[in-house]
Amino acid sequence: MSELLNKLEWRYACKKMDPTQSVPQDKVDRIVEAARLAPTSSGLQPFEIIVVTNAAVREQIKPKAWGQAQITDGSHLLVFAAWDNYTADRINMMFDLTNAQRGGTNEGWENYRQMLLKNYPARTPEVNFEHAARQAYIGLGASLIAAAFEEVDATPMEGFDPKAVDEILGLAARGLRSVVIVPLGYRAAEGDWLANLKKVRRPTAQFVTEVK
């Protein structure tokens, strides 16, 4: 655990990535896998990750993200895209997948399915999207921890035009909406104003309240 905490101490929101360095594919795979294995509400996993390495596509996205250079200077761009709604088909897909993988089902599990089918599709699409987006952020957190463990710089960004990114990547046709983007790369040797500054977090006593 101390090794992991040391890696989290090492990470920061890299502002300038070295465009000559590329993150090895095996590291990217492990970072993405950490997000795939992350917990989600009811196990529905209501988001997907689009891994963008195409330079031309990243150049298209860059001006829609206020020109942030990490998008093109990093070697990979992860786009976390949440379901635009919960539908019966999507809920059944995940329950059927689970049953197939586990080799069976049980009454409690099927009752739970019916509860979700009754409640989730009845809500507005925007409420459902916001719920799905929160699940994507759980995956984001897992991927950032994994990136730190791999000593890969990962800079999460909300500063972008999601509708424009959705259009570039054709997400609407897939029932997805972009939530957060994460360039992956390696910090540049110089030119990053944030690189060598002390990491500052609130003291534990201010951050944690114990109720005994």
Image (tube, grey):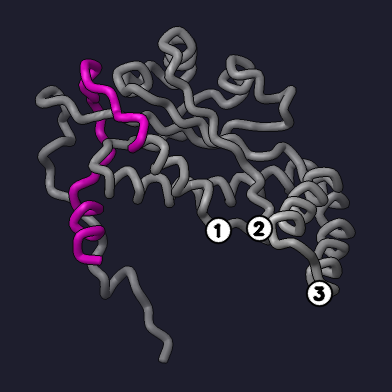
Left or right of 203 in this view: 95: right
Residue bearing the label numbered 1: 39
Q: Secondary structure at mark 2?
A: helix
Q: Quadrant of residue 55?
A: top left
Q: Magenta span has 185?
A: no
Q: Nearer the viewer, residue 45 or 141?
A: 45
Dot placed on the residue nearer the N-terminal end, 1 or 3: 1
Q: Quadrant of the N terminus?
A: bottom left
Say if mark 2 contacts mark 1, CB within 8 Å: yes
Q: Secondary structure at mark 1?
A: loop
Residue bearing the label numbered 2: 43
| Badge 3 amino acid | Gly
Q: CA distance from mark 3 to mark 2?
A: 15 Å
Q: Nearer the viewer, residue 75 or 64?
A: 75
User: Residue at image x 25%, y 58%?
Assistant: 4
| Badge 1 amino acid | Pro
Q: Magenta span has 16?
A: yes
Dot placed on the residue nearer the N-terminal end, 3 or 2: 2
Left or right of 209 in this view: 196: left
Q: Secondary structure at mark 3?
A: helix
**Which x, y percent locates residue 33?**
47, 45
User: Residue at image x 18%, y 35%?
Assistant: 194
- Residue 113 drawn above or below residue 189: below
Report crowding for label 2: few under 14, some 14 to 19, many 20 or more residues within 10 A (C-alpha): few
Left or right of 46 in this view: 189: left
Report crowding for label 1: few under 14, some 14 to 19, many 20 or more residues within 10 A (C-alpha): some
